[in-house]
Image (cartoon, rainbow, N blue to C red):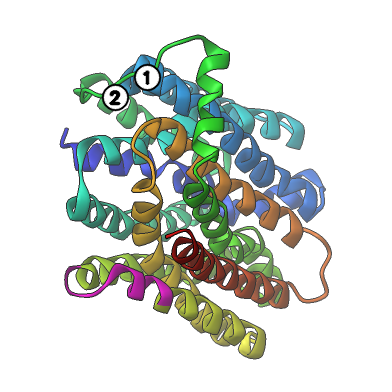
Amino acid sequence: MPNFLFITMLAAFPALSTDMYLPALPTIQEQWGISLAEVNLSLVLFFILFSFFMLIYGPLSDKYGRKPVLIGGVGIYVLGSVLCALSTNIWFLVAARIVQAAGAASASALSMALAKDLYTGTERQKVLAYIGVIIPLCPMVAPMMGSMMLEFLSWKWIFGCQAVLASMAFYGTLVFKEPEFEKTEGGILSMLSRYLVVLKNVEFTTYCFAFSVIGIGFFGFLAGSADIYIRGFGMNEQQYAMFFGFNAIGFMTGSFTCSRLCVGYSSMSILKVSLIGVILASIGVLALGGTEYTFAAPMFLMTFSIGVSRPISNHMILETVDRDIGAASALLTFTYFIFGAVAMEIISFDWPAKIRVIGEMGVLGGVVPLLSLFWVARRARVTQ
């Protein structure tokens, strides 16, 4: 299996784990007679535990290698998917989702580490951009697959499908030829202490946390979109899947645009323009989001701008470290998803206008990383 395809499969795990069953959330809510906040626990706790497990897998892979960690993690994910399909109440489902999270974390954390191991410089930036083009196919296709299953089958079959797809990735881990890299030494505490080494890198830490905020508007949309489109705008599951997929196209076209622009333009200029795009699109959500169409249009622009920024920002952040790549990659992905989990929990509250909250999150997501770029540049000038 080609390395590019394998890394893409691993990076797709978060979308595979969430977007396919998003159309089923209102059905699960009605079937079990629970609130939106309760059913969203299966989303929120997944991302929280998913994020924390990544902090474990990163240093483990630096010590023992990427392949053995991936074999164990992807195997756990398959088990978690089967348990989700067998769940009989929300607490069983939440527990099974935590098992899923424990497995998915290995794939997501190490996909970026493998990109660093296998590629360098502009080639890595292009690979990250191309992956950014392919990955949005998951959130575009997955809700459609889920909604089609709901038309003929129980929502539990969605998790059965996830188990089958993950088994293909498990095969990929078995045949994958791991690249050589300098492994760390010492016990568990020594491995975890590598995070302190990484965090002492001021440039890495600043960019890592600031650029993790960029996605909170989208994560708020992720958790609130089914309620907004199905309950708020009166759509059915199939219509919702189409509108949700429209946002995935935004990510895809944004990443593809990045892959084209990074050849002839300054990466920093592209990054700054994309962040301004996130801010302007979020203001559009605040000003125009009264109907399904006037909400979808600025949300598309927000996800497009995030899609442009992610390959460049990830490459920029990874360039600030030379060792402990697994730990740095895990920390980078951890902060992105933990901020996302907080955003999903916030949108689950009984807000009178969820669309407005998403717009406000989007503005914050653009302003914070933009300010970090100016702060790091000013700090560099002062210390010279």
Residue at 40% in and 79% down:
273
Q: Which amino acid does label 1 sit on?
A: Ile
In this rendering, position of residue 181 left or right of residue 111? left
Residue at 54% in and 63% down:
214
Residue at 21% in and 25% down:
179
Nearest the camera: 212 or 238?
212
Q: Is mark 2 on a helix, strand or loop?
A: helix
Nearest the camera: 53 or 174?
53
| Residue 32, position as x, y percentages in the image | 78, 43
Q: Where does the C terminus fall, quadrant-wise?
A: bottom left
Look at the image and give the residue range highlighted in magenta: 263-272
Q: Name the residue under label 2.
A: 173
Question: From this viewpoint, which residue is outermost toward the top?
Answer: 187
Would you say residue 128 is visible in this rendering?
yes
Mark 2 to mark 1: distance in Å?
Answer: 6 Å
Q: Mark 1 points at which residue?
A: 71
Magenta-drawn stretch, dominant element (helix, strand or loop):
helix
Q: Is residue 240 above or below residue 61?
A: below
Q: What element carries label 1?
A: helix
Crowding at dot 1, Cα within 10 Å, few <14 / some 14-19 / many 20+, comes out as some
| Residue 138, position as x, y percentages in the image | 39, 53
| Residue 286, position as x, y percentages in the image | 66, 84
Q: Which amino acid does label 2 sit on?
A: Thr
Crowding at dot 2, Cα within 10 Å, few <14 / some 14-19 / many 20+, comes out as many
